[in-house]
Image (cartoon, rainbow, N blue to C red):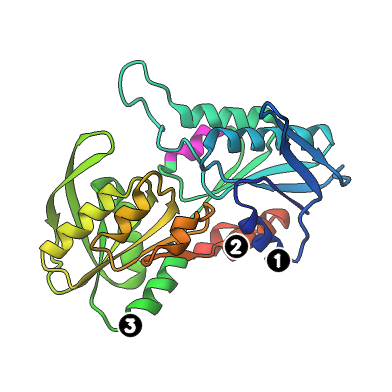
Amino acid sequence: MKLLSGNSNRPLAEAIAAYLETPLTDADVRRFSDMEVFVEIHENVRGEDVFIVQSTSSPANDNLMELLVCIDALRRASARRITAVLPYFGYARQDRKSGSRTPISAKLVANLIATAGANRVLTMDLHAGQIQGFFDIPTDNLFAGPVFTREIAAESGDEKLVMVSPDVGGVVRTRALAKRLDADLAIVDKRREKAGVSEVMNIVGDVEGRACVLVDDIVDSAGTLCNAAQALMDAGAEKVSAYVTHGVLSGGAVARVTSSALDHLSVTDSIAATDAMRHARNIRSIPIASLLGEAIRRISEETSVSSLFE
């Protein structure tokens, strides 16, 4: 087995390498003066089982191109099998036609990865489970649920928990976590007037006097999350925290979270933390290197990955 890292989330790749007790492959992933991506691998990978760790987070297009060029370099170096490890799969929110003459970019990116030469994909908490079907190669979708379960259980103690979905689309994910924690379920019903702006309308479920935990897969502008937290507090919640897999947190999102009603926002390190995130008073990072590392080990050894979540 060999591990190769792009530049999108080097600390996570190093943590995975430490878990697996396998050094990262010596390689240069850099730019020419006109920002073209160039990759040079300094080790023999012929006949090897190679895993490339690269989130396609901001800058999404640059990091995606890095991944594709790395795959091509490995294919031309005669690697036996190439697995693209995408802790965060960018473009996942474009998983259907949202209107006339609009693309399904998640499918396009899946095609690019397969065409470049990847034999397998390992990712985490896809925005929609059916995106797995966009790939014409085997795809494993890991879940942050078990990691969140341990964190929430340790944090909550004897508090009466209510797991809250910030929208109707996330109910399945939230219900699964509520079942693990033997907690109640609530839903925030909202009406989105236009892209990037959300208006909370109603809380479905009893949250009065309870510790509420919002659960989602992606937090970007954080508008939905912060509005939901305020609506829960207005409905009588004792406190509100949030657990989200992918902390995109673009634009003024960090400042929005810091000044919100959220007790804390916990995100995994699937996306490298910015300085603003690291210094925010109520944003925490949850490491996932052991989860990804164990999945990589099992793929390499041809054993069950799904048993990680049983």
Determine the residue positioned at 27% across, 71% down.
183
Residue 138: where, in percent of width, then height?
A: 61, 41
Q: Earlier in the sequence, mark 1 or mark 2?
A: 1
Name the residue type under label 3. Gly
- Mark 2 Cα-neighbour bin, 10 Å: few <14, some 14–19, many ≥20: many
Classify mark 2: helix, strand or loop.
helix
- Asked if residue 27 lies left or right of residue 33, the reply is right
Disc 2 to disc 3, how far (Cα)? 25 Å
Q: Earlier in the sequence, mark 2 or mark 3?
A: 3
Residue 247 lies within the magenta run: no
Disc 3 to disc 1, how far (Cα)? 31 Å
Discs 2, 3 touching: Cβ within 8 Å: no
Instruction: State the predominant SS element of the stretch in magenta.
Output: helix
Residue at image mark 3: 157
Q: How many marks?
A: 3
Residue at image mark 2: 289
- Asked if residue 227 lies left or right of residue 71, the reply is left
Classify mark 1: helix, strand or loop.
helix
Magenta segment boundaries in residue numbering: 130-135
Question: Which residue is outermost to the top?
Answer: 101
Residue 69: where, in percent of width, then height?
A: 70, 33
Look at the picture and state if 78 lies above or below 181: above
